[in-house]
């Protein structure tokens, strides 16, 4: 570790790579609520957070596991579930009186067309205003899962590989070829509810 009178020890969360304080300061001084998206391998967590003098306050939140209540059978960590979780969080934020949010992706990489931006697209379709670049949003075909359906059709010739690749879908009694139709059903239920 560096020594000397001129050395300033960075904050612990900065050393751990968990918080970028420059970006956080800009987000908080904007005074707009933040749409905080935190993906993991199996789930997506979306929160609408307001910064207050006594600390951050979570206004609304949505977890991808909540999609099961709407009949979602596919895995909860994919592109389609990220969009649906953003849609659910956006509807809850609108119900709480929030109309505009700023996307907060933390220290995650800004990959165009990623699950994080699929979540932002869901919030946009729910009616929230989210400043964004349209090229960052994923294509509608990917959000609906059409790429999964077409890939599953190519694997149908090899039943063993098909079962291994889509075991999570088959365990829930969902054929991956029908993912776009299943996505449309769940999306309609979220919009209606």
Image (cartoon, helix red, strand yellow):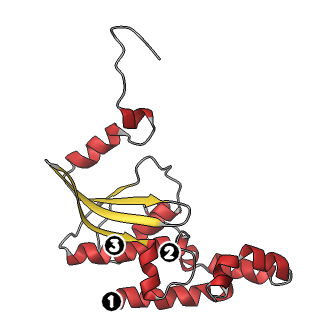
Residue 59 horizontal/vertical position (percent): 23, 65
- State the residue lying farthest toward the top: 4
Residue 132 appears in the figure? no
CB under 8 Å between discs 3 and 1? no
The CA span between labels 3 and 1 is 12 Å
Q: Quadrant of residue 174?
A: bottom right
Which residue is denoted by mark 1 in the rendering?
193
- State the residue lying farthest toward the front: 171
Q: Earlier in the sequence, mark 2 or mark 1?
A: 2
Left or right: 95 in relation to 170: left
- State the residue lying farthest toward the left: 53
* Badge 1: residue crowd in 10 Å (few <14, some 14–19, many ≥20): few
**Residue visible at 73% across and 77% down in the picture:** 151
**Residue visible at 20% across and 45% down in the picture:** 29
The CA span between labels 2 and 1 is 17 Å
**Residue visible at 37% across and 65% down in the picture:** 46
Residue 24 horizontal/vertical position (percent): 31, 44
Q: Quadrant of residue 147?
A: bottom right
In the foreground, 135 or 58? 58
In the foreground, 42 or 22? 42
Q: Earlier in the sequence, mark 3 or mark 1?
A: 3
Q: Earlier in the sequence, mark 3 or mark 2?
A: 2
Residue 142 horizontal/vertical position (percent): 58, 74
**Rendered position, 18 above or below 11:** below
* Badge 3: residue crowd in 10 Å (few <14, some 14–19, many ≥20): many
Which residue is denoted by mark 2 in the rendering?
81
The CA span between labels 3 and 2 is 12 Å
Which residue is denoted by mark 3 in the rendering?
89
């Amino acid at each position: 570790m560096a020594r000397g009178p001129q050395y300033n020890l960075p904050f612990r969360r900065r050393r751990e790579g968990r918080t970028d304080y420059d970006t956080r300061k800009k987000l908080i001084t904007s005074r707009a609520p933040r749409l905080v998206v935190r993906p993991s391998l199996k789930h997506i967590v979306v929160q609408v957070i307001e910064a207050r003098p006594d600390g951050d306050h979570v206004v609304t939140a949505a977890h991808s596991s909540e999609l099961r209540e709407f009949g979602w059978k596919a895995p909860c960590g994919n592109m389609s579930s990220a969009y649906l979780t953003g849609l659910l969080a956006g509807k809850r934020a609108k119900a709480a009186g929030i109309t505009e949010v700023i996307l907060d992706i933390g220290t995650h990489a800004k990959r165009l067309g990623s699950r994080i931006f699929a979540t932002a697209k869901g919030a946009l379709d729910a009616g929230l205003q989210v400043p964004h670049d349209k090229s960052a949003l994923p294509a509608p075909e990917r959000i609906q899962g059409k790429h999964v359906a077409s890939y599953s059709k190519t694997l149908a010739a090899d039943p063993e590989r098909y079962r291994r690749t889509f075991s999570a879908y088959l365990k829930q009694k969902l054929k991956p070829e029908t993912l776009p139709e299943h996505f449309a059903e769940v999306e309609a239920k979220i919009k209606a509810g």
